[in-house]
Amino acid sequence: MKKITLFLMIALVVFSTTVGAITAEEIIQRRDDNEFIKSARVESTMIINNSGRELEKKMVSLIEGNNALAEFTNPMDRGTKFLKRDDNLWMFFPDAEDIVKLSGHMLERGMMGSDFSYKDMMESEKLTELYNFELVGEEEYNGRPCYKIEATKVEGAEVSYYKRIAWIDKERFIGLREELYAESGRLLKEIVVTRTEEIQGRWYPMESIMENKLRENTSTTFIINSIEFNPEIPEGTFSLESLQ
Amino acid sequence: MKFLLTLAGRNLFRNKMRTVVSVIAISIAVMVVIFARGLIIGMLDSSYSLYIQYDSGHLKVIDETYDQKEKLLSLLHPVDGFEGEGVLPMVDKIESAEGVNIAIPRLKFGAMASPGDEIVRMLGWGVDPDKELRFTDIESNFVNGRMVKANKKEIVLGSGLLNKLNKTVGDSLTIVYTNSFDAFKGSTFEIVGEIDHYLPLINNRLFYIPLDQAQRILIMGNSATEILIKADTMNEADEVQPKIEQIINNNDSRGKYIVQTWDEANPMLKLFNVAEYIYNVIYILLILLASIVVINTMVMIVKERTQEIGMMRALGLKSKEILTLFIIEGTFLGVVGSFFGAIFGGMLTKYLSIHGIDYTQAVEGMMEEFLMNPVLYPVYNLENVIFGFILGSIVTALTCIIPARRAAKLEPHDALRNI
């Protein structure tokens, strides 16, 4: 009888521990629930700081699954459009007659001179499909308790960054900071979320600063001016014809 | 003296074969010197001319910081005129300076085009079309169409580039580039001309658009990346440089511009300059080498004629006269050899200066940055032929002093000892 009691007690302790602990995958899953966009209409501003020079770019984007269409609205770039369909990216420039397809290493370049590469902006797959996650600790970041998660790329997955370390808010399940590394261990980029908001029941990063560590004296602030989840997107929005 | 001349002449015909071999050695050396000098001058002249047209001008005005960033094709350090008032008034002002023949603005930038999935990297030059034609030899290299016109969305490319892009004159071409605000942009131009140039840079990489169009798409205001200046000759660059600097200092208080002479602007040209001196030393060494044959001949003659020299000395010929006799013999070999060398060297150089030497296959994979005409035309001029003749004669005459002195030093009793 004593043996049975002891067994039950151990089982209870083990069971309760398992229930209480959250795995790295679960944290990422809950973050994805907040941040992963199925469809949205976003109005945003990008402030690019480059060696003391500040440039502001505004755009309106429509996102649906793996597709996105963005149009710049600031005077200098007005009319420039991006169309992303799955892994392909096309651009339309008001001064050009042809649509230009970006490919290869051009996608690694800073988007419109920013610290975000075109690939960063194109990331639409769930990270859980591309990386193996490990919960490496818990830390406070900017006064918020966070999970520190390390992600290493899944063998064979095609990603821009071999490793990522993310600080995810323990209560709101939203990324507050992320470091992006090359396979060599070199820090390539750092993104810091400076403002979050709860919109339609989900926490979303509204303002973030990206720093490309390979460039000197540059940073890009990305501000979401408005975001509408699951809007009505007319059919044919993501066609090449819609670019022109 | 006449006696010595007759004696020397007779001696030279004693062993005709030996004399002929000596003359041939000198001839070949002089011929090689004349040809090599013509070839080197031709090569350097052609390269200087290409660098001056397509790289550095006789003088180049740039922003001081641009000097280090030129390879990156930076648009952040432009020539924007005096006090930022625009490059064209600055070009006009420079052109009015004494000693300046022509001044042109160029706006250089990087661009790409993507026929299919391939990316073709290109180098764009925004130019003043009329002046560009006057500044370079590009006009004679048009195989199709014409040069771009100001204020028009037109583009001219090299044949190699057109092939890569699968385009032809009359088609439109969309180029993508990063403007001066780091924004990625695209523009479409109409192809109006095709250039077939031997320089890989122009044939495979470069395109011309009007300066105003380059300024518009790159958002560069009225700026260029450089102003190139031609004086009357490249040697006058040093004289004109302070005059341009004076004009800039008088009109611009920012102190941001530098004026470089052709050899300051391009280290390669400085190297060419040094090479010219080195080649001159090589020519002398080449003749010295041939002179060894003459020295050898003379030493043999002295050895053979030791008893004869002793006899002549015993009969009253002075040591100085013996010295003169051998110098006359050596000089004769040198002069005759140099004469034939000059004739054949001159003929060879003249022939090749018309027909050229085609290096095309050898330099096929040559770097685009290296500006060299793959067909080399040696320069033929009388001065070069005379230079070869005089160099050959003098060096041979000087070298034969060594065996002549040996002969002159022989004492009659030593020379006659072996009879």
Image: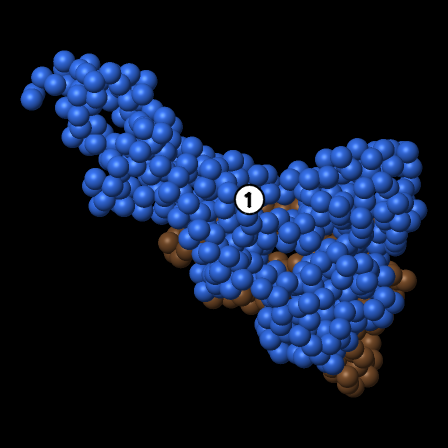
Chain colours: A brown, B blue
Q: What residue type is labelled 1?
A: Glu
In this rendered view, identify the residue nearer to me: B180 or A154: B180
Place of residue B330 in the rendered image (x, y in percent of width and height, measured from the top left)? 32, 33
Place of residue B156 in the rendered image (x, y in percent of width and height, measured from the top left)? 72, 70
- Split into 4 quadrants, where in the image is the C terminus of chain B? top left
- Split into 4 quadrants, where in the image is the N terminus of chain B? top left
Kindly identify the residue that appears in the image at 14 percent across and 13 percent down.
Answer: B413
Instruction: Using the image, determine if residue B223 lies above or below residue B7.
Output: below
**Badge 1 element:** helix
Kindly identify the residue that appears in the image at 31 percent across and 46 percent down.
Answer: B24
Kindly identify the residue that appears in the image at 14 percent across and 15 percent down.
Answer: B414
Kindly identify the residue that appears in the image at 66 percent across and 68 percent down.
Answer: B141
In this rendered view, identify the residue nearer to me: B386 or B140: B386
Instruction: Using the image, determine if residue A57 lies above or below residue B41.
Output: below
In the displayed structure image, the side of residue B24 where residue A71 appears, left or right: right
Place of residue B261 in the rendered image (x, y in percent of width and height, measured from the top left)? 70, 39
* Residue B114 seen in render: no
Q: Name the residue under label 1.
A: B383
In the displayed structure image, the side of residue A160 where residue B187 appears, left or right: right
* Residue B192 seen in render: yes
In this rendered view, identify the residue nearer to me: B180 or A241: B180
Instruction: Using the image, determine if residue A26 lies above or below residue B4.
Output: below
Chain for disc number 1: B
Place of residue B243 in the rendered image (x, y in percent of width and height, measured from the top left)? 82, 35
Q: Which residue lies furthest to the left in this view?
A: B419
